[in-house]
Amino acid sequence: MKGKKLAFGVLDIFLILVVVLSAAGVAVRCVLTDKNGILAVTPERTSAAVQILIEGIENSSSDFFSENAVFTVGDHDESGRLMSVTVQPAEYYKENEKGELEIAYEDEENGRRDVRCTVVVEGYYRDGIFMLGGATPMLPGAEVKLSGSGVVATALIIDTAPIEEHKS
Amino acid sequence: MAENKNKRRVSVTAVDLIIIAALLLTGFFTYRYVFSDPVGETFELDYVVKVSAVRSELSEKIAVGDEVYSEDGAYMGRVTAYESRGAVMGTTGQTIPDRSDLQITIEAVADSGGLVSGNEIYVGRELSMYTTGLFFEGVCISVR
């Protein structure tokens, strides 16, 4: 009994194969596919022009938003450069004499400002959706954080379009 | 003698049976995990999400046929209809200029537990979702 040798048979090989194939199946499911079980292929990194609107910021803070200013966009340390910056007196709603709401504008000199601009940022297109950092969908209606030297703002995304020529 | 030598006996012990049983169970659960599509009956579910006071320039970015995903990327169905109305202040009933209330009807397949990609859909539930054209946050106002 003491000197009994362990024999390595066909059944052992079969069992090992089953274990290895099971592990491979789990790996394929977890690593290579997305949440919907579709094979995930890493797309090419590209640039997009994201039109944004920053509403009601202080007059002095609006100076930070100028052409070619660089901001960190979102939570993925992606840098974005501003283009086509338009700063206007901020819109707000006021009630007219009929009791209806109407759009009014803040004081031209000292009132708050709305900033509309385009931020050029890199990311990935997945299923037609531009994903910042490969994870955050940059879609109209979503909000994104912009942080730069001296100012942090939340911007509403108005539109997103691919721009191959800005690829660095 | 020579005949006995060639007749090699294979003995299956209790330990072998336990190992085989364990492997079969492992295989079964691995299969269930890898092919984790809902087992059992599924049914079609239509639900309506109301999105309040959307900027008018954004309300046009949704279309019938758009696929809808939850914020974490799970498939939540397809847009079958949508309605855009002038947004109204909940408290005073005043119309809000340049804003629309959207009602988006989504058709989805729910599993036997009534879940759509693991998400429970019920009236009053707040949902953050997106299509290829619009990200929206709304409240479910109808399920049928």
Image: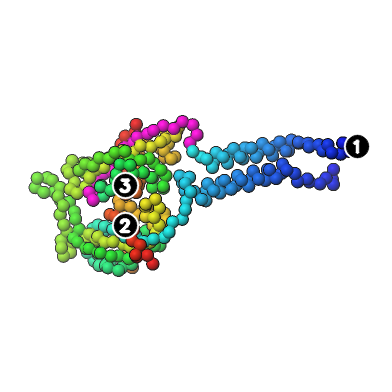
User: Which residue corresponds to the image point at 59% horizontal and 37% vertical from the top-left?
Assistant: B28
Check the picture and name the quadrant holding the C terminus of chain B: top left
Q: Position of residue A14 (x, y in %)?
A: 68, 43
Which amino acid does the dot numbered 2 rest on? Ala
Closest to the observer: A41 or A29?
Answer: A41
- How far is the residue under mark 2 from the one under mark 3? 19 Å
Q: Amino acid at mark 1?
A: Met
Q: Is residue A65 magenta?
A: no
Give left or right: position of A135 versus B91. right
Horizontal side of residue A94 vs B60, given as left or right: left
In the picture as drawn, the residue positioned furthest to the right comes out as: B1
Residue on which disc 1 sits: B1
Q: Is residue B41 above or below residue A89?
A: above
Marks 3, 1: nearer the viewer: 1
Looking at the rendering, the stretch of residues picked out in magenta corresponds to B38-57
In the drawing, does residue A54 fall left or right of residue B35? left
Give the chain of mark 1.
Answer: B
Task: Of the two numbered discs 3 and 1 on the same chain, state the one appearing first in sequence.
Answer: 1
Tag 3 near tag 1, CB within 8 Å: no
Seen from the viewer's position, the closer of residues B55 and A20 is A20
Does B49 lie within the magenta span? yes
Residue A70 appears at what percent x and percent y?
33, 67
